[in-house]
Amino acid sequence: MPNLEGGGDGVVTDKQVRRMTRMVERGKTKVLASLQTGMDRKTAQKYLELGRLPSEVAKGHTWRTRTDPFKEVWDEVVEKLEVFPRLEGKTLFEFLQREYPGRFADGQIRTLQRRVKRWRALEGPGKEVFFPQEHHPGVLSESDYTRMSKLGITIQRQPFDHMVYHFVLTYSNWETGNVCFSESYESLSAGLQNALWKLGGVPKTHRTDSLSAAVNNLNEKEEFTQRYKALLKHYGLKGQKTQAGKGNENGDVEQRHHRLKRALDQALLLRGSRDFESRGDYEKFLKEMFTELNKGRQDRFAEELKVLKALPARRLEDCKKLQVSVGPSSTIRVLHNRYSVHSRLIGEKVQVRAYAEWLDIWYGQRRVDRLPRLQGKENHRIDYRHIIDWLVRKPGAFANYRYRDDLFPTSRFRIAYDILKDERPVKADREYLKILHLAAKESESAVDRTLGMLLDSESPIRAEEIKNLVCQAQQPEQVKDPIIVEINLQIYDSLFEEMGVDHE
């Protein structure tokens, strides 16, 4: 819109004054110039004397054009803002509506929000200032975890609840990362080491936020945990941490979180599906996304590579080693969760090597089992194969077994047990344990398929019948004696004769 000046002289625009001034400078009289530009002679004289445009002399009004509905309660609003500076205008408006019923209409909320915004800008507390940092090649790396649930990733139609450990070089913004499920030390160790070995070198400094896996709490004298200090020492890294509640100090990786998710979301839209056949397929997709993001950073990344320190001769193990005893229930307790092991280990001490996603069970310098690691606390994972030999001998223990729900490998096993309880309540436990024993000794998938077939046909569930069907399905096809057709060598003789070749 043009700049206007109101008053007794009428409305005059900057454009009119500029045109009138040019005409006077070219020799036209003030009277003619004012007439041709459509303004009063006295007005033209005023602007010629001032040497300024209307927009440069106009004054905005400072008086209110309507009654302030919050005038009488404003001191009360300010008092609350001074005590709680982060209170939003909407919250304050709802408070006033409760305190003064019927006084403030819903449509007045914008008026209060504007007043609160103005108060914050003119009288409120100062806001935190962010100071742009100058980065240098090979000096600083940052890492953090980010949750990916909002992207809606699924594996075979099942929600895939996971995080990404995210590593960034702050000079070039080169980045990498991997799927993980917790912020444990093992996850941090694996993620950082994966990043460094993919990078092919070591920067001077690594910064995290106040991860409990790396940073001691305020009661500890040492800044970092012993295990994290050992990891940093192994790679010759200097550790840094952000202040508590100051995630912006890890700003580069925080920004990369948002941009990574946005890029992934766009790529998923183009892909046409957020579902993946396997975790491996999704991880391949994620790896390809990092490759694409890094393509535009090659020049600055090359500068970083020149000054990175060499990697050590080997990686550190990404695990925590624990010595635990196997209890009489054939279970061990590891990092606040309970797991079953084979009953032959009852009463023995085993070494547990706890990695980010699995546990390796060692006995006598030999790995005897690998178990998926549970997340959280007070959870349990009981593998029926570890204890089924004794359960079939003590079927009475099944009914009230604390971890009984873990002994239904699939929904079909559970349905079969419920049917047995309805049809044969006295023998149901014994019959079901025979079926479970068959799954452990033969094939869980084969028993599951057979159960599905029986359930679909509404046939009786019997352990002996299931055993027969499984054995029949696993019978190899009979190999028939091969039939060898006699070859007529005269065919080759005639070919040689046609070619004029002496084949004798």
Image (cartoon, rainbow, N blue to C red):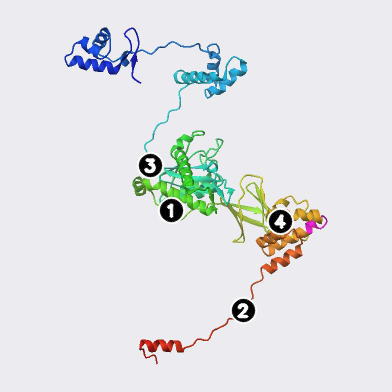
Query: Residue tagged by mark 2?
Result: 480
Q: Residue furthest right?
A: 426
Q: Amino acid at mark 1?
A: Pro
Q: Quadrant of residue 136?
A: top left
For the residue pair 219 and 239, the one nearer the viewer reads as 239
Q: Earlier in the sequence, mark 2 or mark 4?
A: 4
| Residue annotated with mark 3 | 171
Q: Which residue is mark 1?
A: 312
Please tell me whether mark 4 sits on a helix, a strand or a loop: helix
The residues colored magenta run 425-430
Of labels 2 and 1, earlier in sequence is: 1
Is residue 352 toward the left or the right of residue 137 in the image? right
- Relative to 88, is 442 above or below? below
How far across and how far down the image is residue 127, in percent? 45, 25
Give coordinates of residue 56: x percent, y percent.
31, 15
Label 3 packing within 10 angstroms: few (<14), some (14-19), many (20+): many
Marked residue nearer the N-terminal end (1 or 4): 1
Q: Is residue 236 rendered magenta in the image?
A: no
Single out the mark in the foreground, 2 or 4. 2
> Identity of the amino acid at label 2?
Lys
Identify residue type, mark 3: Tyr
Q: Mark 4: which amino acid? A: Phe
- The outermost residue toward the bottom is 504
Q: Which tag, 1 or 3, sits closer to the chain's start? A: 3
